[in-house]
Image (tube, rainbow, N blue to C red):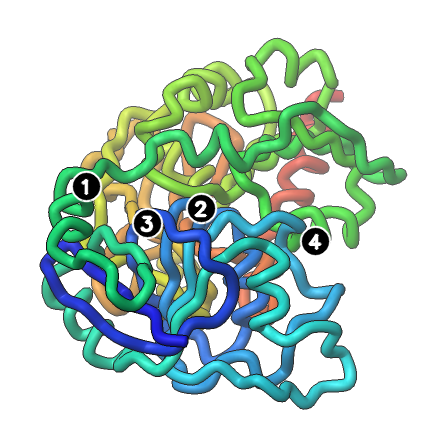
Amino acid sequence: MKRLLILEDGSVYEGTAFGADHFQVGELVFNTGMSGYQEVLSDLSYCGQIVMMTYPMIGNYGINCDDFESLDPAVFGFVVRECCEAPSNFRSDYTLDEFLKQKDIPGISGVDTRAITRKLRNSGTMRAIMADEGADVEAIVAMLRSSELMHDQVARVSTKNAFPIPNRGKRVVLIDFGAKNGIIRELSRRNCDLTVVPYDTDAQSILDLKPDGVMLSNGPGDPKDVPVAIETIRELMGQVVIFGICLGHQLSALAAGAKTMKLKYGHRGANQPVTDFESGRTFITSQNHGYAVVGDELPAEMGEVAQVNANDGTCEGIKYKKWNCFTVQFHPEANGGPKDTEFLFDRFLNNVKAAKKEAR
């Protein structure tokens, strides 16, 4: 069965349908990872987006029940060059097509993903939608051009109620802006006694839980769309040890008086080089974001840029001076890799231990 991918600039790509037929307008983005498509599909930071994989064959090891970053994916569509219909892996429980149908996500294969990637690199991300063969393309393009992208992604994907993940270690509150299971996994591996709270939980309610540290998770969309979280972080800073990842990094920077900007086509993949100024090392990192902190706009008395992207020089990490807080744009919890920066979770807990010792 034929299916169309239609972009707001009027481009139309004809391919083969797979997955569901629930078509929604989304921001078309590309991911350069050679593997990890299951983690990409289940990463809530992709809420409201149509994701295209640049690697030519996707689905060759199927979908298993162990590697999800969330149980309810929020992507609006999936675009691949070739969809493998007969995966070969002892862990596989579903084909990619079966999984997308189960989760009501449309897919399209057989399109020139290289050409579309070049277009997005040159022109920036675009609004797009899939459609059945024979659809009124002219009307759909007009609809795309008049459509607004979502602004409530965090509210959609955050937990609605606080819940505990008990353990015997340090007490950590995880503010859920769309948290990946990988963050919970890494904190739990280090015996953290976790409480996961909704994105709009106020600072006093968090402090009432008597946390040793606060973790700010990843999440989708423009950080400026979550002013309630910016205010909460501003009130928490200086009162508790904080570690922020991805959207948590951007929200912290806004709370400290910096600015953020939308990137032309974002950083999405498992091969982004990040240079750390303190050590002089460059790490390979997993990333998924369309916005970045404007490092030059961070007030000098608040903090300093600690890491930058080696490709384009954008801010990848901040070390704060006034507060016991550090944040990174990339994903140290990356699953299925790379694992270069997992040590940052240990740094966070070392900061927690040092703060408790100092408070005695």
Residue found at x 29% / y 58%: 28
Q: Amino acid at mark 1?
A: Asp
Marks 1 and 4 in Cβ contact (< 8 Å):
no
Instruction: Identify the residue under disc 1.
Output: 296
Between discs 3 and 1, the one toward the N terminus = 3
**What numbered label is drawn on residue 78?**
none
Could you give the CA–CA distance between mark 2 and mark 1, rounded to whole angstroms?
Answer: 29 Å
- The answer to whether 258 is drawn above or below residue 62 in the figure is above
Q: Is residue 111 visible?
A: yes
Q: Is residue 178 above or below residue 85?
A: above
The amino acid marked with disc number 4 is: Glu
Q: Are marks 3 and 1 in contact (CB under 8 Å)?
A: no
**Mark 2 lies on residue:** 47
Query: What secondary structure is marked by label 3?
Result: strand
Q: Which residue is mark 3?
A: 26
Instruction: Give the crowd class for mark 1: few <14, some 14-19, many >=20 residues within 10 Å.
Output: few
Mark 2 against mark 1, which lies toward the viewer?
Answer: 2
Q: Earlier in the sequence, mark 4 or mark 2?
A: 2
Q: Which mark is residue 186?
A: 4
1 or 4: mark nearer the eye: 4
- Residue at the extreme front: 134
